[in-house]
Amino acid sequence: MMSNSNTSNKLKIFIIVCVVVFLTGLAATLTGLALHGWKDLDRLPGGWHLGDWNIQEGSGNTDTYTLSGNDAKFDAMDLNLSFCEVEFTQGDEYKVELTYDTKMDRPDVSIENGTLIITTSDEHFISGEENGFTMIVEITVPEGTIVTDAELTMDACQVDISGLDAKNLDLNMDIGELIIDGVTFDTAKFNINLCEATIKISGEKEDYDYDIVNGLGSLTLEGTDVENASTETNAPNYYELDADLSDVTITYQ
């Protein structure tokens, strides 16, 4: 006769497997929505609620809000964004440009004590088109600018921060696609869940110490598959990476 202990253990394993399968399916669905458009979502009546997200069909028309020059100058950033495309570039001047659906409130934008703050509301509108997000956030800094602190929280976004150089970078991202091509930093923390991330770091591998923790998913460091890895060589730069249910590739250039 099977013991109660064995039965309990098997039940726990069964429950864990069911939860993993459910979360994997949910992750695939949400990632598909975030990365490949919202073609069929407008067929749902009213709004679609998932946690704190309240998603409505957009009007199809957009407004643009722009800050430029000295009005857009900042030394640090604190961004809390969801359901949008985000791009950082380097140009001739400071510039912040938001494109958003006319049905939605414009994201809150302010510069306080030298910190650029942008926050989206709880309601998010989608266009119903095959590709792309209704809201686009474009941030430009003069070439050679190094931001002191960049705190970025992104949910269900497509993010390209290739034009961002920061002394201290703290990026938290759930669901979406992350592209970093040539970023520089003194210290960085990457917390990535349900994401596809390509990270190219400026400099040589020997310039960086790191602490990497990889949960479910895949992570490749300079062509080598890794799970948990760390170095302590007193290198001048340091980063932490905590990834789960994500496909991450890290290289140096």
Image (cartoon, grey):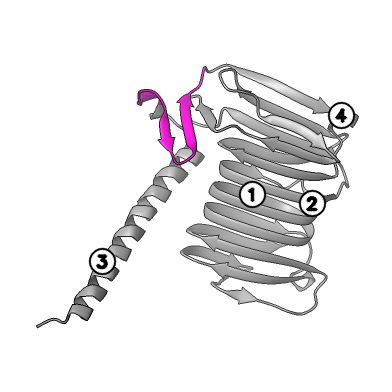
Please name whichever residue, 28 or 12, is drawn nearer the observer in this view of the structure: 12
Q: Tell me which numbered mark, 1 or 4, is placed earlier along the sequence.
A: 4
Q: Amino acid at mark 4?
A: Asp
Tell me where residue 88 appears, x and y as whole percent. Answer: 73, 41
Q: Can residue 253 be seen here?
A: no
Query: Is residue 51 inside the magenta stretch?
Result: yes
Q: Which residue is mark 1?
A: 179
Q: Amino acid at mark 3?
A: Phe
Q: Which residue is mark 2?
A: 149
Q: Tell me which numbered mark, 4 or 3, is placed earlier along the sequence.
A: 3
Q: Can residue 68 be seen here?
A: yes
Q: Which residue is mark 4?
A: 71
Q: Which residue is mark 3?
A: 14
For label 3, the SS is helix
Tell me where residue 196 appears, x and y as whole percent. Answer: 54, 52
| Real-space CA distance between mark 3 and mark 1, rounded to the nearest whole angstrom | 37 Å
Q: Tell me which numbered mark, 2 or 1, is placed earlier along the sequence.
A: 2
Please give the range of residues in magenta.
Answer: 42-59
Question: Is there a contact, CB below 8 Å, between mark 1 and mark 4?
Answer: no
Q: Residues within 10 Å of mark 3 (few under 14, many from 20)?
A: few
Residue at the extreme left of the image, as rendered: 1
Q: Residues within 10 Å of mark 2 (few under 14, many from 20)?
A: many
